[in-house]
Amino acid sequence: MKKVGSKKNNPFPLTIEELKKILNKQYAYSSDLSFTVYEHEEQKIAVFYIQFSVDEMKLENYLLETLLNTEEQLTNQLALKRVPLSDGGEYNNFESILDYLIQGHVFVYFETENSVLGYSIPNKIIRNLETTETESLVLGPKVAFTESLSTNINIIRYGLKSKDLVMEKHIIGRRDPREVRLIYIRSIANDTDINTFRQRIKALEVDFIDDTSVLNQYLEDNSTTVFPQFLITELPDRLIYNLSRGKIGVLSENSPNAIIAPSTFFSFFESTEDIYMRWNSASFIRILRFISFFISTLLTPLYVAAVTFHYEIVPTPVLITLGESRAAVPFPPIFEALFLELMIELLREAGARLPTKVGQTIGIVGGVVIGTAAVEAGITSNVLVIIVALSALASFTTPNYIMGTTARIIRFPMIIFAGLLGLIGIVFCTSILLIHLIKLTSLGRPYFSPVYPFRWKDFNKSLFRSKPDMQQERFISYRPKDKYRFKKIKKGLKKDIDE
């Protein structure tokens, strides 16, 4: 029998009237407390719970019907044997009773025995499995996580049938306790990473955790940087893929997202589609995403620097075109670029907040109309409109929304420094950016790996995708002590293929 609390802190014996007064005092500002008294033979019992948080069908059919239809003298031991609910237990601590009430527990107080039994029958709201919305895919499974932790765990168990799969349970939140699961494959994941993650979760002291995205901000190594250090996904197959590569996942109750750590800068440009495509096609698309990131951050600043300070680097035919397009523009290139970039950001935010159909219309029509009107009014040049549009288009190729937002933020200081110092300003910003990326860590691991520290063997896991027969050493970078073992496995596989 499960017992919660100790008899030292037991506030009983109490009469039912006294218990009701205490509970009404605790929930004086809430009308959701249900407190009902039943008489059975010579025994008086009180059943109390929070309405709407309890499955009332199970309460009526399994608990009350069993208790009230028993012909014998009703006791707590008899109730534990007869009630067909598996998680019943005796509670001796009044604070524990108050905590479990809000989590969907029903309590039965036996006045003559001065004992309380509790059963967990929460009324869980579960939505059906749906396709992902934030991570669009063409190939591969498209099912997404839901807000139900039990459903998400079942999806992981269904997709990853490994006896080494571990799901550690943790509770976070003082005022709103929320269940969190730390997920990893015991024989693959690095012990140091597991202990670091576990320690950060246990050391976290907060009142509320609204979502996995909020939990991610508390657990990251550096909370001031604009670069995300942990990967957030709503795709179960992406989490499963990373778990099989030695990484660690975190699932939270009431959240449709999962955290993946440790992650590198290059992890945010990977997509699950890369797994299901041929390795050469996937490598081409992944490299294209990296190029698009640099186009998004550097193209507009390069235009501002060239037109403001370094027009000699522009070919003469192009320079003539630029001169003609800017002849009627009264503003310097830096203000012209900042105006257009700000307009694009406003259109992007408006399209994201409006309903889907209206948002798409606003984005297309607004961009065309405002861009054309700005050129005709002489506020900006038509060449810069094309460059800003190309930069915005390139930022959409990043599979991760947070990293795409990071590129949008970086672009503005780049434009300002390019307008003030030219190419020297761009080089200065890029150097600061590289130094910052080199110093960053994710769960204590280098964030800019495998570029720094340089490791050529890991390039096929980040910058491009290697052939399937080169994936046998995929765990070496996560478990250095097992390097010899995995090389031995690879040799054994090659020997079996030859035979």
Image: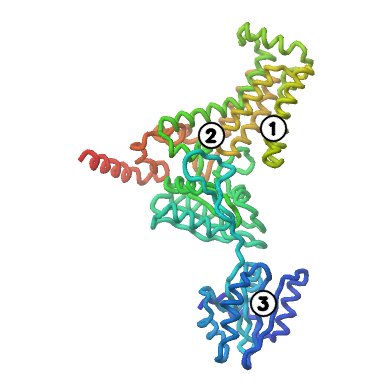
The image quarter containing residue 377 is top right
Earlier along the polypeptide chain: callout 2 or callout 1?
1
- Judging by the rendered image, the residue that carries numbered circle 1 is 363
Above or below for 395 versus 245: above
Secondary structure of the residue carrying tag 1 is helix
Where in the figure is residue 283, as x and y percent of width and height? 44, 31
Where in the figure is residue 441, as x and y percent of width and height? 53, 41
Q: Quadrant of the C terminus?
A: top left
Three-letter residue code for mark 1: Gly
* Of 138 and 445, the residue lying toward us: 138
Residue 203, visible in the rendered structure: no
Where in the figure is residue 165, as x and y percent of width and height? 43, 56
- Judging by the rendered image, the residue that carries numbered circle 2 is 438
* Of 66 and 466, the residue lying toward us: 66
- How crowded is the residue under tag 2: few (<14 C-alpha within 10 Å), some, or many (20+)? some
Q: Is residue 224 left or right of residue 473?
A: right
Residue 48, disc? 3
* Of 407 and 45, the residue lying toward us: 45
